[in-house]
Image (cartoon, rainbow, N blue to C red):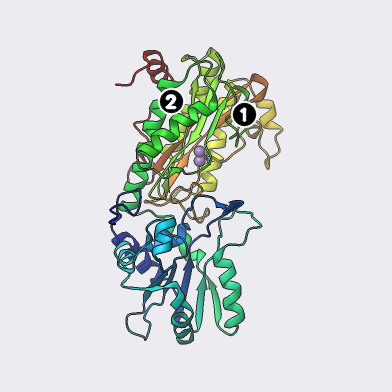
Amino acid sequence: MTYKHITRYSPINPTLFQRNRQRFMKAMKPKSVAIFHSNDLMPRNGDQYFPFRQNSDLFYLSGLDQPEAVLVLFPNCVKDGFEEIAFIKKTNEYIARWEGHKYTKEEASRISGIKKIYWLEDMENVLNELILLATRIYVNSNENDRYVSDVVNRDLRFTHELMKQYPTHKYHRSQPIMKKLAMIKSEYEVQLLQKACNITKHAFNRVLEFTKPGVMEYEVEAEIIHEFIRSGANGHGYSPIIASGANSNVLHYNENNMECQDGDVLLMDFGAEYANYTADLSRTIPVNGRFTKRQRAVYDAVLRVMKEAIKMLVPGNLIEEYHKEVGKMMESELIALKLITKHDVEKQDPAYPAYKKYFMHGTSHHLGLDVHDLADRYAPIQAGMVFTCEPGIYIPEEGFGIRLEDDILVTDHEPYNLMADIPIEAEEIEEIMSAGVLS
Ligand code: GLY
Ligand code: MN
Ligand code: MN
């Protein structure tokens, strides 16, 4: 049997991963070895597992998209040819019959650009020899600063084992290096993100044609996933939010089980994941195709803030300062909408400004292999960074909220909007919805 397609996405040029490894190794201290593991297959229930999603760091450095893969980097290793090696699980007839094709050594080498590929069963011996040649070990972990979980991953389990076996080596964290690298996207990565955005655009266009009073939120979700899968996306990059009416005020609503009512808005936040890179889009549309006067006023306020905020995503600005500036813009809009007063602003607690009552989340986060991508949030904005821009106004007392979100590449010139061709002007949305067809 021959298998043409190892992954759903088109093959990625291994140069991307080779360059990433080179940059990582350049940042390592002398006589050190770095080890990265795949994600676990996460148990679902009974004998089932959730669909596999590769560990973003391992993928970034190797392109290997299979469970039980391990990457080892050893810059200037005295043992010739051992600067970069990988271990993969040995496949057999039984696995091929029940689970399907798994990488051969040649395939893993072609995907990653790594010459030496071993079976996982050889890891203990091969790695032991390398570790004894090193004095330092870089271990990986999840250092996303918003991550909280009781679940122990493969990297952490392995780190505990290493520390028991090699207690006198010096241990280092890989994540500070990874953060510096991952937050600046290469041209190739931007192309993959653009592809994820384009798929997301097609899904949104489909939703514009589909939505009308009486449809269920999950029917809208079904339109989106249909478009994603047929376009070669893995699926959603994060749980989609399809929130009509009052649900649009729940920031992380993802039950998606209510009927969309005439006169309500539909706030959607979804993004296709293509080759493990994710888009992150928000749009809010009128269920019946026409905003009410009030909905439109709030919509336009959010859009004005967004347009001004995008202009500030330029090299040299600090994200914290940027958030404060956007807060001030939002403050003026909320006063004009009569949601807060100048008096509220004068007496506000600086730690919790008045605008936060209606806009309580950040405006931007890094985007890449993960929706809230690995990054140093205190580093100044630099060309090559990709940020979302996602202002919103949420008014529970009026039964609706509006959020708009585009994905923006920072360049040495103007910010480049990866979602520039996704309808966003209120008239444009209304026109498309009333015509029922997209050109
Ligand atoms: N969809 C998650 C976010 O916008 O941050
Ligand atoms: Mn979003
Ligand atoms: Mn976002």
The residue carrying mark 2 has its beta carbon less than 8 Å from ligand 2: no
Q: Is residue 181 visible?
A: no
Amino acid type, callout 1: Asn
Task: Kindly indicate the quadrant of the structure image that contains residue 22.
Answer: bottom left
Tag of residue 207? 2
Q: Label 2 near label 1: C-beta < 8 Å?
A: no
Residue 29 lies, with reference to residue 299, above or below; the image says: below
The kind of residue on which mark 2 rests is: Val
Residue lying at 52% horizontally and 53% vertically, measured from the top left: 377
- Please name which of the two marks, 1 or 2, marks the residue nearer to the observer: 2
The image shows residue 54, relative to residue 332, as above or below, that is: below
Instruction: Give the vertical position of 365 relative to 41 (above or below).
Output: above
Specify few, some or many for label 2: CA neighbours under 10 Å numbering under 14, 14-19, or 20 or more: many
* Observer-nearest of 132 and 298: 132
Quadrant holding the N terminus: bottom left
Local SS, label 1: helix
* Residue 25 on image: x %, y %: 40, 72
Circle nearer the N terminus (1, 2): 2
* Residue 32 appearing in the image: yes
Where is residue 26 shown, x and y percent of the image? 38, 72
| Residue annotated with mark 1 | 249
Report x, y in % for residue 83.
36, 77
